[in-house]
C-alpha cells in the first residue's frame, strides 16, 4: 500500500512551504564552459550546490527533496564524461553520508541501479542503510532514472504481485510499486539552466506539481534563488481541478 494518495484521487493539503521539492539540476557544463573550465569542474561545483540546497531545505522546513542526478538517457553522453560522473558519484557518497546522517537526513537512491558497477551499488546500499533511521529530511537522488522506466517497472511488479488478475487495474494498485511510493507528490518542481521541459522526470508524480523554470545555472542556484522559487510557488492557486470560488469557500468555512 502506498503511503500517500495520488492528487488525482484525493485533494492534498497545500502548505505555504512546499512539503516536497523536485529539482532538475541543469547547467553544470555551461557554467564550466563560461569559465573556460572542463565540464567535469561544473559537475563538481554542482555537488557543492546540492549540499547548500539540502541545508536550505532543512532551514525552511521542506520535508522531501528529490534531485535528478543522472537520467537513463544520460548514458548517451561521451564515455569520458559518464565515467567521470560515476567517479564523482562514488566520491560524493563517501564524503557526504556522515554529514547527512549527523543532520538527520535520510538518503535514498531511485532508478535502475543494476547498470552501475558493484562497488557503486554497495556504496548506495551502505549509505541508505546508514541513514535509514533519519526523518528530518528525505533526500532522494534519481540516478539512471526515467519516468517511463518507473511506470513500466511498476506495472510489471504489479502484474507479478497479482498474477491471476487480467483487467480492472486502478491507480491505487499501481502506486505502491512506483519508485517514489514513500513520498507525497512534489509540490514544487524546479529546473535550472533555462530549458523548459521535464525531460522524463517523475512523469506520474508531477501531475499537479507547480512548475518553476529559471535561467540560472545549477552551480549558481543559491539560497536567494531557492527562495525565489518558493516565492513563486506561494503565489500559485492550487486548485486540483476545483474553481477559485471553491477555494475561497473552503477558506471561509
Image (cartoon, rainbow, N blue to C red):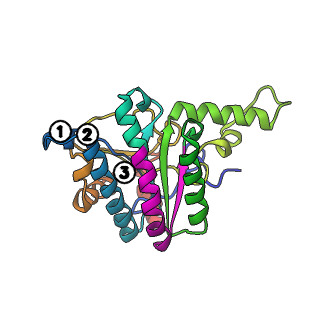
Q: Residue at x 27, y 35 (%)?
A: 195
| Residue drawn at the location 60% of the way across and 45% of the way down | 9
The spot of residue 38 in percent (x, y) is 22, 40
Q: Which residues are magenta?
A: 87-110
Q: Which mark is residue 126?
A: none
Which one is earlier in the sequence, the residue at label 1 or at label 2?
1
Residue corresponding to mark 2: 39
**Cβ atoms at labels 1 and 2 below 8 Å apart:** yes
**Numbered disc total:** 3
The label nearer to you, 3 versus 1, is 1
Task: Characterize the local packing of mark 3: few (<14), some (14-19) or many (20 or more) Cα atoms within 10 angstroms.
Answer: few
The residue where tag 3 is placed is: 237
User: Magenta residues: mostly which secondary structure?
Assistant: helix
Identity of the residue furthest to the left in this view: 35
Spatial CA distance of label 3 from label 1 is: 38 Å
Q: In the image, residue 166 lies at what x, y percent? A: 80, 26
Q: Is residue 132 above or below residue 206?
A: below
Pointers 3 and 2 in contact (C-beta within 8 Å)? no
Q: Percent position (x, y) of residue 217?
A: 23, 45
Observer-nearest of 43 and 155? 43
Residue pointed to by mark 1: 33
- Give whichever of discs 3 and 2 has the lower sequence position: 2
Q: CA distance from mark 1 to mark 2?
A: 7 Å
Amino acid at each position: 500500500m502506498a503511503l500517500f494518495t495520488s492528487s488525482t484521487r484525493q485533494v492534498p493539503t497545500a502548505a505555504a512551504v512546499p512539503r516536497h521539492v523536485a529539482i532538475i539540476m541543469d547547467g553544470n557544463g555551461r557554467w564550466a564552459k563560461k569559465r573556460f573550465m572542463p565540464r567535469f569542474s561544473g559537475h563538481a561545483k554542482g555537488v557543492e550546490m546540492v549540499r547548500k540546497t539540502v541545508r536550505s531545505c532543512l532551514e525552511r522546513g521542506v520535508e522531501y527533496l528529490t534531485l535528478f542526478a543522472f537520467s537513463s538517457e544520460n548514458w548517451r553522453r561521451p564515455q569520458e564524461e559518464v565515467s567521470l560522473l560515476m567517479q564523482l558519484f562514488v566520491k560524493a557518497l563517501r564524503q557526504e553520508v556522515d554529514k547527512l546522517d549527523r543532520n538527520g537526513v535520510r538518503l535514498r537512491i531511485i532508478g535502475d541501479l543494476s547498470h552501475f558497477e558493484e562497488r557503486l551499488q554497495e556504496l548506495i546500499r551502505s549509505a541508505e542503510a546508514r541513514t535509514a533511521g533519519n526523518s528530518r529530511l528525505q533526500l532522494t537522488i534519481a540516478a539512471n532514472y526515467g519516468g517511463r522506466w518507473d511506470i513500466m517497472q511498476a506495472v510489471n511488479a504489479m502484474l507479478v504481485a497479482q498474477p491471476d488478475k487480467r483487467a480492472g487495474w486502478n491507480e491505487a494498485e499501481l502506486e505502491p510499486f512506483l519508485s517514489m511510493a514513500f513520498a507525497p507528490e512534489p509540490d514544487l518542481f524546479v529546473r535550472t539552466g533555462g530549458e523548459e521541459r521535464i525531460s522524463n522526470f517523475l512523469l506520474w508524480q508531477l501531475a499537479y506539481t507547480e512548475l518553476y523554470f529559471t535561467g540560472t545555472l545549477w552551480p549558481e542556484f543559491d539560497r536567494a534563488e531557492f527562495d525565489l522559487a518558493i516565492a513563486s510557488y506561494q503565489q500559485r492557486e492550487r486548485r486540483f481541478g476545483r474553481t477559485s470560488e471553491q477555494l475561497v469557500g473552503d477558506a471561509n468555512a
